[in-house]
Amino acid sequence: MDLSELYQDLILDHGKRPRNVGELPGHNREAEGFNPLCGDKLTLYLRVDDGKVKDAKFVGKGCAICTASASMMTEELAGHSEAEARELFTRFHDLMTGKITDEQMPESMDRLSALGGVRRFPMRVKCATLPWHTLIAALDHEHQTVKTE
Ligand code: ZN
């Protein structure tokens, strides 16, 4: 397997120096993710106001792919509406599972497309998608809470 292709510069950079690491002060959404296949663990914090993701941070212990994906995802999320965040998840998931190609990714998601190469390594796809599944869990959790209020 061609590791140089898998670990592209962008992924390497985010894996080594992840952005948005730490607990988010004033967060109102939170979810935990665990990928037993690799041992990736992360907690995602979101601050959602007026249906918009204002900020996202994470704390985790994961492999380079998982860490890079979480770092890139939190960078991408800020400023998007909840609906847009879910759409990003769907596109990213489609890319990672081979439903769409890099070329079919919206231009605005160029940086996330860098992770597309991971899909050639099925064991690592779960590493890359874990932060995104955690995102959906965090968004869904608030909906359940809202119902009980
Ligand atoms: Zn992993």
Image (tube, rainbow, N blue to C red):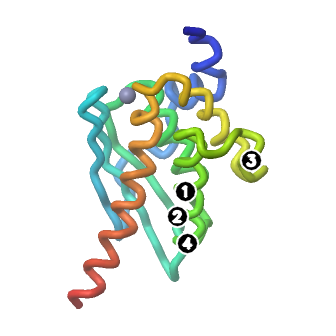
Circle 2 sits in a helix, a strand or a loop, which is it?
A: helix
Q: Mark 4 sits on what residue?
A: 83
Quarter of the image holding residue 95?
top right
Q: Quadrant of ligand 1?
A: top left
Q: Residue furthest bottom?
A: 149
| Nearest to N terminus: mark 3 or mark 4 | 4
Measure the C-alpha gap from mark 4 to mark 1.
Answer: 11 Å
Q: Mark 2 sits on what residue?
A: 86
Circle 3 sits in a helix, a strand or a loop, which is it?
A: helix
| Nearest to N terminus: mark 3 or mark 2 | 2
Q: Nearer the viewer, residue 143 or 119?
A: 119
Measure the C-alpha gap from mark 3 to mark 2.
Answer: 17 Å
Q: Which mark is residue 90?
A: 1
Quadrant for the C terminus in the image: bottom left
Disc 4 packing (10 Å; few <14; some 14–19; many ≥20) = few
Q: Amino acid at mark 2?
A: Arg
Q: Is mark 2 within 8 Å of ligand 1?
A: no
Measure the C-alpha gap from mark 1 to mark 3.
Answer: 13 Å
Q: Amino acid at mark 1?
A: Thr
Q: Nearer the viewer, mark 2 or mark 1?
A: 1
Mark 2 and mark 4 residues within 8 Å of each other at the beta carbon: yes
Residue at the location (28% across, 29% down)?
37
Measure the C-alpha gap from mark 2 to mark 1.
Answer: 6 Å
| Nearest to N terminus: mark 1 or mark 3 | 1
Mark 4 and mark 1 residues within 8 Å of each other at the beta carbon: no
Residue at the location (52% across, 67% down)?
53
